Image: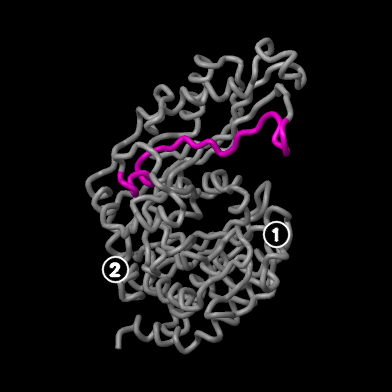
Amino acid sequence: MSQIDEIFDYIKENEESYVARVMEYVSHPSISAHNIGIREVAGMLVHYLKGLDFDAKLIETPGHPFVLGHRTVDPSKPTVLLYGHYDVQPPDPLEAWVSPPFEPEVRDGRIWARGIGDNKGQHFAQLLAIEAHLKVTGTLPCNIIFCLEGEEEIGSPQIADFVRNHMDELQADLVVTSDGPLHETGQPVITFGVRGVASFDLVAKGASRDVHSGNFGGVVPNPIWTLVQLLATMKDADGNITVEGITEPVIPATNLELDAASRLPLDLPEVMKDLGLEALDGPLDRPYWDRLMFHPTLTINGFHGGYGGPGSKTVLPNEAIAKCDVRLVEPLTPDHVFERIEAHVAKHAPNVEVVRHNGMLPSKTPMDTPFAATLIKAVERARGVEPLLYPTVGGSLPDYVWTKILKKPAFVVPYANADEANHAPNENLEVVRFIDGIRTGASLLFELGQ
């Protein structure tokens, strides 16, 4: 029997204990938005890492602290940085939970609790994988840096400075994050990149106050019409972004990325049925996965202005606001997008104000990186099935700190079920997925050690 098979057997023997331990862990709230339980949970993690013979500590920031642990077993072996976050979303609305969010229960083969999927259950699976190696072999097959932040759920405002200020302590050969869901079939996933984001408001003003639409209509400019006409210049009827220069730097997908995207399972009629759609957004000739991976988007998130109550009110509003975001692909930056948006608005509606909000850079690791084969083999060994390879995903994570600041290849290898309901009431993690996560984490360390 191989060493990794012995570790898998040990994991199987301890499944019941592992479930009880992760339930105890997630029973401790760590809500970053409300600063509830943050330091208690961070301290628990430092204590646990020290129990695994890690050199572990809290690192203070202007916000919530990072948890950082190191264990070097052989300088000639690879070093993997395992990233996650110990903060969770607020549990509201409480009345929508079947069981209290911080009183974990097992029902229908799932653990139900806030943070069990996002992200405490997933990084706890990584810790248990490390523990299993130590229990069976007395050592680790590679060097490990364990890094957990306490502000991911509020946008990771400190992470870029943290990485810049602690470069020497974060030197690894690769970064692996276990966060997010598997494919809806339960098939494992390896993700090589994420899109970035740039959020902004467009604010149009008219008179100094709301006025009567009969007495002043045709006299006083209507800020809602101002925004409608401006927005119509930013995206055409075919779905193409028409803001001058905004997409010019975009790097086309590689053949390897296009091939990987084409292999991803998709039941498009079922997706459209589930969403109640008769047609997709334009451009109509663009493949489904290409839309989510290889192209920027311009989205109107909300439009506010004037009267929105029951019945009618003949009012001409004095202000209108469009809340928007652009999802970024390489090599777009929030600053580039903001500058092009501002130039476009200045040309087409100079009295409209652009209010910049948050931005996050995209991140991409080349799919032909040498570590890809190692990760694929590790997932296949643990799960008995080939993983789906995502060149990038549509959402945004702060992976850019690893690829652009630390300049290391970064991957996301999620463990949670697709219906984990993270950020929502009744967050859950299937027990089998949690155990699979421990197996996958153990297999990853084993393969890196080879």
Indicate the secondary structure of the residue bearing disc 2: loop
Q: Residue at x 64, y 58 (%)?
A: 89
Q: Quadrant of the C terminus?
A: bottom left
Task: Provide the residue designation for mark 1.
Answer: 92
Magenta-tinted stretch: 287-312
Task: Provide the residue designation for mark 2.
Answer: 386
Q: Which mark is residue 443?
A: none
Q: Residue at x 73, y 60 (%)?
A: 36
Where residue 359 appears, x then y in whole percent? 54, 38
Q: Is residue 173 visible?
A: no
Q: In terms of depth relative to the viewer, which is nearer, 439 or 314?
A: 314
* 14 w.r.t. 164: above or below: below
Type of the residue with mark 2: Glu
Where residue 327 appears, x then y in whole percent? 46, 40
Left or right, residue 154 beside residue 342: right
Type of the residue with mark 1: Asp
Where residue 400 appears, x then y in whole percent? 45, 45
